[in-house]
Amino acid sequence: MTVSSRPSPEVLTDWDRLVDGTRGGDVAQLSAWAAVRREAGYSPRYVLARQAGRPVGGALVLQRALPLLGTVGYVSHGPLIAPGPARVAAVRAVGGALTGLGRGLAGLFVQPPYGADDVAAHLLGRGFRPSTAGVGPAASIRIDLTGDLADVLAGIRPSNRRSIRGAERRGITVREGCEDDLPLAAGLLSDSAAHHRFEPLSLDYLRVLYRELARGGHVRMFVAELRGVPAAMVLCTGCAGTLTGRLVGMRRDAEVRRADVVRQADWHAIAWAKAHGYGAFDFGGLAVDLVDPIRRGADDLAERLTGPARYKLSFGGEPFRYPQAVELISSRLLRRAYDWSRGSGPGNRLLLDAARRVMRGGGAGRRNAPKFFGSSRSQHGQRG
């Protein structure tokens, strides 16, 4: 086991290869993401289990010092453990290292990746407790792309299929975006932010995010145009065979809203993912309390669904849960403040929201860094 803030370039290359090749892998565990999160004041610690010189498991822990409370860390979509006969030993080794690291921090918050229930169970057995900090989505909706694209289209609601098929007739075209489109993307995100009352990402942050992820081919942008004028954008990240919708921006004028431009951009992203060998498209978040009602077709499902959830479900796909999120809070002061914030009063909820912003973005008073991997995401705004 090694715990390091500066692994060699060769070790980071091996780690990135493990992340991109392991079920549940996500850009939140890539070394490129550590460079992105430095913009929000986070520093990386890599916890790596190795066999014959190669990583077989590990986690990217992002840390930040908080005034009065000490240093906190979080792991989103990790730790990742390679399949195979060494998995059980790797889970134990990585779990032990994370526990030791967590005891030296004020708090450590972990959202294990899809399919890693054994990792969550192991951490709970080591003294972690269930967490609601929301450092990653607790659930999402995923579309299987291993079959024909025609089958995916057939799974979409009929009215939405007609909308997709009639896009060109209505003057809607979708193109791939590039780095030169980032000012446009920032403007569209700002339009959505003003409408949905959240603070948008800064252009500088978007540039860092795009450049770092683009080096490894882990980011794609799709721009929908209405009669040749940009009207909406969808930014996606790709890792471990899944393309995930992260950010959505849209002009808010009536003509654009009626044109259903975001749906066209999302469909183009799905078709692009299929054409480029991805096995799934993930809409990047769903309220976890909707998973069971959706699966059983609850009688009151229509009343329960939010607008973003209804939109995502209109594409078909299957809802799923991530493993139980866990936390290890060693600081008594942080534990007391955090436990109090989880109470039912409105002031308590405000404090909890502030704590979540610290973990997901730049801090309670600095919100230009994204709530990029949150579990409740707007249809038109920061999906991830």
Image: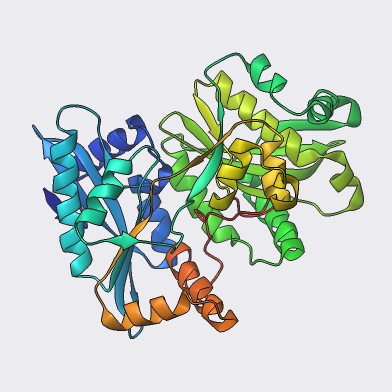
Q: How many marks?
A: 0
Seen from the viewer's position, the closer of residues 194 and 357 is 357
Q: Position of residue 15 (x, y in %)?
A: 26, 39
Comparing 310 with 49, the one in front is 310
Furthest residue in direction left, as rendered: 52
Q: Position of residue 343 (x, y in %)?
A: 49, 77
Residue 19: x, y in percent? 32, 37
Residue 117, compared with residue 273, is above or below; it is: below
Above or below 329: residue 124? above
Query: Can residue 171 be seen by looking at this rendering?
Result: yes
Relative horizontal placement of residue 72, taking residue 166 as reference (left or right): left
Foreground: 104 or 220?
104
Whether residue 362 is visible to the viewer of this picture, yes or no, is no
Q: Is residue 296 left or right of residue 67?
A: right
Residue at position x 64%, y 67% in the image: 199
Name the residue at 24% across, 70% down. 105
Indicate the position of residue 333 as horizontal and vertical percent values.
31, 84
Residue beneath the point at 60% across and 31% down: 317
Residue 256 horizontal side relative to residue 375, left or right: right
Colouring chosen for the image of the structure? rainbow
Q: Is residue 82 left or right of residue 361?
A: left
Q: Image quarter for residue 338?
A: bottom left
User: Within the image, what quadrant is residue 175 found in?
Assistant: top right
258 or 340, nearer to the observer: 340
